[in-house]
Amino acid sequence: MIIKVVNPNTSLEMTALVERSAKAVAGPDTSVYAVSPAMGPASIESHYDEALSVPGLLAEIAAGEESGVDGYVVACFGDPGLDAARELARGPVVGIAEAAMRTAAYLGRGFTVVTTLSRTRGRAWDLAERYGMRGLCLGVHACEIPVLELDSGALDVVVDACARAVEEDGADVVVLGCAGMTDWAAPISAAIGVPVVDGVQAAVLTVQALVELGLCTGKRDEFAAPPPKRYAGLLRDFGC
């Protein structure tokens, strides 16, 4: 089985981090690799960033289809381009926000999300609503650290933000709201005493399970391949 993890931003350092985290949980018969698109924003922290990340993401999905990839992870907590990716891919495509929220729902009566900048909180609430998790999502909190500044020196700040979020919301579980936090779930959980879910690892294991079960996105209607048409300008190579 081959799982391709697409980090929709162009930070190669972050992509390497995501790949290490993904490989750490994959089964022995699963090959996992992560990529960044050739075009797109350095980080995704606005609706504008998210919109401009999607063409590069879709190009990576299309390339994976040509090379025989079995399933995909979209490694950005906004789950950008998820529906479009599902149209292109034969196998399952899972976003890290959806995977993390659904995993957290198994672990308690409610979860809280700790993300990067406050301007991204609305997107997390929107996704909780879309995925049927609005009743279980008790809060969305920002640590006010930009994505590309989530280095080891920021861990203590995120730990404190998670502890405050659990206390304020009365949550049983914390969901980490950025792929750049992927290797922090265990130390944060140890520090604050509640389960902490990282969406990258949750999504990899979800895709792995779906492929092993022989399941993929239904192609009867909405998620069928997009209808052939021409695209112009910078998008001319995206025509089907």
Image: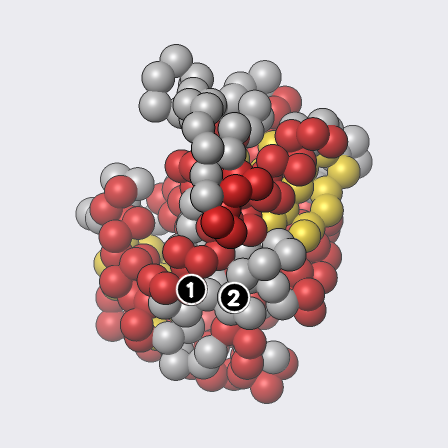
Looking at numbered disc 1 in the image, what kind of residue is underneath it?
Asp
Toward the viewer: 17 or 228?
228
- Dot 2 lies on which element? loop
- Dot 1 lies on which element? helix
* As drawn, 36 above or below 215: below
Looking at numbered disc 2 in the image, what kind of residue is underneath it?
Pro
Instruction: Give percent across and percent down for residue 140.
Output: 29, 65
Q: Residue at x 78, y 31 (%)?
A: 29
Q: Which residue is mark 1?
A: 49
Which residue in the rendered view is the most extreme toward the right?
28
Measured Cα–Cα span from mark 2 to mark 1? 6 Å
Toward the viewer: 218 or 189?
218
* As drawn, 56 above or below 91: below
Circle nearer the N terminus (2, 1)? 2
Q: Is residue 226 left or right of residue 35?
A: left
Q: Which residue is mark 2?
A: 41
Tell me the tag on residue 120: none
Q: Residue at x 62, y 44 (%)?
A: 60
Disc 1 crowd, CA 10 A, few/some/many (<14, 14-19, 20+) = some
* As drawn, 152 above or below 61: below
* As drawn, 233 above or below 149: above
Indicate the colouring scheme: secondary structure
Q: Is residue 190 left or right of residue 145?
A: right
Q: Are marks 2 and 1 in contact (CB under 8 Å)?
A: yes
